[in-house]
């Protein structure tokens, strides 16, 4: 039997977390600079140059993509679970402030530019474990840029900044507005920052166009000295936020979720509905015309390659292209209406802006699915099987996977609110310690850093379920996963301790989901520091599928600093297809058993 892995013995990480939690108990805001020393001391694998004077471009790009573009103008960050928490602590009407978003992290945030205050909604302690190290890393790297620029008069002249570091009180010149164009100027600026050509290119991608010059001028003119405070930290506030989220979901659907058997899926907002709604294939000509005319991300070249070499990946390509079509300002309004009609015809209700938690949801009424709209890879199904599916009273609740412990609060709320759960299916990104980006890991052991429990469970998926749909990666089943507390809260010592015990799959949600699953099965709160066997009493499917987005030990390949983008389409659909196949087959069998017992429900309307 698997035993609980030994304590990592990583006192530096524990000290860092104890430090910021103890300081955040203060009734007044704290300065991020008070955390810099312990941040540097933990030797984060994502911020391994934190203590160096050299700019750590990997850490800066990761942090910049997970914070809003306005962050250099922020002086105070206030965190709270819901608008009521902000109001009672002296920040009323935060949702009337300017909404801002990060490119690579879903979180509701609002900015008051006049006072430099950023309000960030948090769904669990995992948001604190994510935000604090990210902001500290950003501030450390920003201040390194400040130090390098203020010591280089040529760079200050190039950026049109005074010798004392003060930026002029006038807007950017037309040349700077467009971004630096002269290769020689770019070289001088790169050398002033001490960056390689590759790292300077990353900086241009993080701060594109004129934003690069604007932020470098800001960095030259002042250091960051951001303050932060947490307004509500009680467990009851997190639970109320989850309750309000669920209430919003219920209000948006025209059926009673309490009365319907429910399959719970944690994945994303696009793959599952693409396979069920038929939107992309229905509007294939329009989407391909968009790709060939606009050439987004050079997808026209991929389309040509698929036409000549690999038609098997065409549907995945079409699904990815449809996302860009939906996001393009010129086509967005028309495309969203087309998608709404397709999803409505397939019995899909989308809840795009739920209250408090930035966790989108979709409700799929299985009895209203249209066989002509389904991706062919989900079938085939006989006429008798479709007749059974059309009599189904069950629904699929698909959510955009939450961060860390928010998964526990969401699933706890769902399992409390509905009468019958029929299955729990979890799909998400992870880091792999022995594979490559694009591989798929299927664990049946999960060690949860939050509860220190080791969960043993029967994963309803095997490699044979995924492999037929994975074209470029490899599937590993019977794996052991670790649910970590945060991306920055890891170092090489931490990872090697688990790797030596055979844990190769690092992610952030499986442990909290299994804690909530335990409470749905057993009549008590999840335990702490135990081996928890879910083999015996689980009355429904438990399925966990992870696809690799990072290889933190080998550093052969990493996508931490950018989106998986088109590269991730293969693994995304290779894991979504088995989930939907499992649900539909399970529902056919459930309806068949009900018919044999004479308790078949009436056809869903």
Image (cartoon, rainbow, N blue to C red):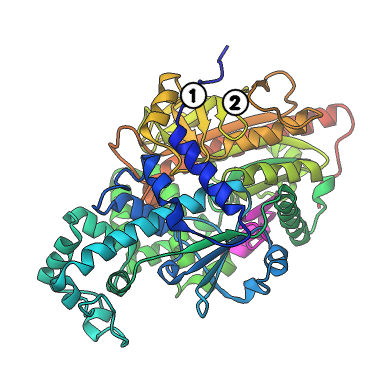
Whether the magenta-drawn stretch holds residue 362 is answered as yes
How packed mark 2 is, by other alpha carbons closer than 10 Å (few <14, some 14-19, many 20 or more), is some
Residue at point 66%, 41% (across, down): 408
Quarter holding residue 527: top right
The residue indicated by pointer 1 is: 477
Asked if marks 1 and 2 touch (Cβ < 8 Å), the reply is yes
Residue at point 22%, 59% (across, down): 200
Q: Residue furthest right?
A: 598
Residue 459: numbered disc: 2
Residue numbers of the magenta segment: 339-364
Of the image marks 1 and 2, the number of the one nearer the N terminus: 2
Viewer-closest of 530 and 204: 530
Per the model, the C-alpha gap separating discs 1 and 2 is 9 Å
Q: Residue furthest left?
A: 184
Q: Does residue 445 appear to the left or right of 49 in the view shown?
A: right
Viewer-closest of 387 and 472: 472
Residue 349: numbered disc: none
Query: Where residue 79 sits: x, y (%)?
Result: 59, 60
**In what element is the residue under mark 2?**
loop
**In what element is the residue under mark 1?**
strand
Q: Does residue 487 appear to the left or right of 403 in the view shown?
A: left
Residue at point 57%, 43% (across, down): 404
């Amino acid at each position: 039997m698997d035993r609980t892995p030994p304590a990592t013995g990583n006192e530096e990480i524990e000290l860092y977390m104890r430090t910021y939690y103890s300081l955040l108990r203060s009734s007044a805001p704290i300065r991020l600079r008070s955390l810099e020393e312990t941040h540097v001391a933990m030797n984060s694998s994502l911020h391994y140059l934190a203590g160096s004077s050299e700019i750590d471009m990997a850490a800066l790009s990761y942090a910049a993509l997970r914070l809003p573009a306005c962050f250099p103008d922020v002086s105070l960050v206030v965190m709270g679970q819901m608008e009521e928490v902000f109001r009672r602590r002296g920040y009323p009407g935060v949702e009337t402030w300017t909404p801002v978003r990060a490119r690579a992290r879903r979180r509701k945030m609002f900015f008051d530019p006049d006072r430099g205050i950023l309000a960030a909604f948090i769904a669990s302690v995992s948001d604190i474990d994510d935000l604090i190290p990210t902001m500290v890393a950003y501030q450390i790297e920003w201040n390194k840029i400040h130090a390098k620029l203020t010591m280089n008069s040529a760079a200050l002249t190039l950026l049109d900044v005074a010798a004392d570091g003060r930026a002029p009180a006038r807007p950017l010149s037309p040349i700077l507005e467009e971004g630096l164009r002269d290769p020689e100027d770019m070289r001088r600026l790169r050398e002033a920052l001490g960056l390689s050509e590759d790292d300077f290119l990353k900086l241009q991608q993080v701060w594109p166009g004129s934003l690069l010059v604007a932020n470098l001028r800001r960095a030259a003119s002042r250091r960051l000295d951001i303050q932060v405070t947490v307004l509500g930290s009680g467990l009851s506030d997190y639970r109320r936020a989850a309750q309000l989220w669920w209430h919003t979901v219920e209000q948006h659907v025209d059926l009673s979720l309490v009365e319907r058997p429910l399959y719970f899926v944690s994945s994303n907002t696009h793959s599952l509905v693409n396979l069920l709604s038929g939107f992309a294939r229905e509007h294939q000509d329009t989407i391909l015309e968009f790709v060939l005319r606009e050439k987004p991300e050079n997808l026209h070249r991929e389309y040509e390659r698929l036409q000549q070499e690999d038609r098997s990946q065409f549907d995945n390509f079409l699904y990815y292209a449809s996302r860009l079509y939906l996001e393009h300002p010129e086509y967005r309004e028309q495309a969203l209406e087309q998608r709404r009609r397709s999803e409505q015809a397939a019995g899909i209700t989308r809840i795009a802006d739920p209250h408090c938690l930035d966790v989108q949801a979709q409700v799929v009424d299985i009895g209203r699915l249209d066989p002509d709209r389904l991706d062919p890879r989900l079938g085939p199904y006989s006429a008798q099987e479709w007749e059974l599916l059309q009599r189904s009273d069950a629904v699929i609740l698909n959510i955009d996977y939450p961060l860390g412990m928010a998964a526990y609060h969401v699933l706890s709320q769902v399992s409390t609110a509905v009468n019958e759960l029929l299955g729990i299916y979890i799909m998400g990104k992870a880091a792999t310690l022995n594979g490559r980006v694009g591989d798929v890991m299927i664990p049946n052991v999960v060690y949860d850093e939050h509860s220190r429990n080791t969960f043993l469970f029967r994963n309803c998926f095997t490699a044979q379920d995924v492999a037929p749909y994975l074209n470029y990666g490899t599937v590993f089943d019977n794996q052991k996963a670790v649910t970590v507390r945060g991306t920055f809260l890891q170092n090489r010592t931490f990872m090697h301790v688990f790797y030596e015990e055979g844990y190769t799959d690092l992610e952030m949600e499986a442990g909290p989901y299994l804690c909530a699953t335990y409470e749905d099965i057993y009549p008590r709160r999840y335990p702490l520091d135990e081996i928890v066997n879910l083999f015996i009493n689980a009355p429904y499917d438990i399925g966990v599928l992870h696809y690799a987005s990072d290889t933190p030990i080998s550093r052969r390949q990493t996508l931490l600093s950018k989106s998986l983008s088109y590269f991730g389409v293969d693994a995304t659909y290779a894991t979504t297809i088995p989930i939907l196949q499992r649900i539909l087959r399970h529902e056919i069998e459930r309806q068949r058993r009900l018919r044999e017992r004479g308790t078949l429900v009436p056809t869903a309307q």
